[in-house]
Image: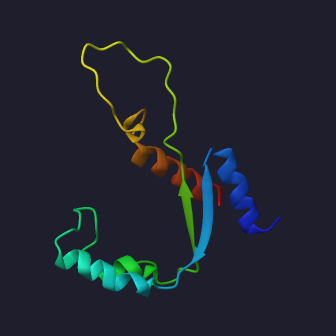
Amino acid sequence: MDLKGYIIDKSKELNIDIIGFTDCKPLDYLEDYLVARKMENRETEFEVEDIRKRIDPKLTFPNCNTIIVIAISYNNDYDDVPDYKIKGRLSKSTWGWDYHLVLKNKIERLVEEI
């Protein structure tokens, strides 16, 4: 089995919903858009200040050949929901464990398998 097939199989074992592979070429077509967002003060605190680092993976990982992208679904159903006096609607991304921690765990386990 080739490495890509092996990684895909391991991702399924780890309950990763989507996995994809892409090259490490710069995403230069995004630069004008990102500069405009910056000028309009629409950036978030989560974005790296240096726009070139956001669009060129080799500035962070100089030896990069392939980027592996994974995703997990927020579509969780919970039957055991307490009957609280206060009612409201919450995004499914807020249900269950913090998805940042879930993704981090799955990424770390996939890296160990690779």
Where is residue 98, by image quadrant? top left
Closer-to-camera residue (46/29):
29
What colour scheme does the image use? rainbow
Q: Is residue 84 above or below residue 66?
A: above
Residue in view at x 33 percent, y 31 percent:
89
Residue in view at x 26 percent, y 82 percent:
35
Residue in view at x 62 percent, y 69 percent:
21
Residue in view at x 59 percent, y 74 percent:
22
Q: Is residue 39 above or below residue 46?
A: below
| Residue 46 appears left or right of 1 | left
Q: What is the x, y in percent for residue 17?
A: 61, 49
Q: What is the x, y in percent for residue 2?
A: 79, 68
Where is residue 54, by image quadrant? bottom left
Q: Is residue 40 above or below residue 74?
A: below
Which quadrant does the C terminus fall into? Answer: bottom right
Q: Residue furthest right?
A: 1
Can residue 50 be seen at all in this image of the molecule? no
| Residue 36 appears left or right of 13 | left
Can residue 111 be seen at all in this image of the molecule? yes
| Residue 27 appears left or right of 91 | right
Closer-to-camera residue (51/2):
51
Q: Is residue 89 above or below residue 86?
A: below
Q: What is the x, y in percent for residue 69?
A: 55, 63
Which quadrant does the N terminus fall into? Answer: bottom right
Q: What is the x, y in percent for residue 108?
A: 52, 53
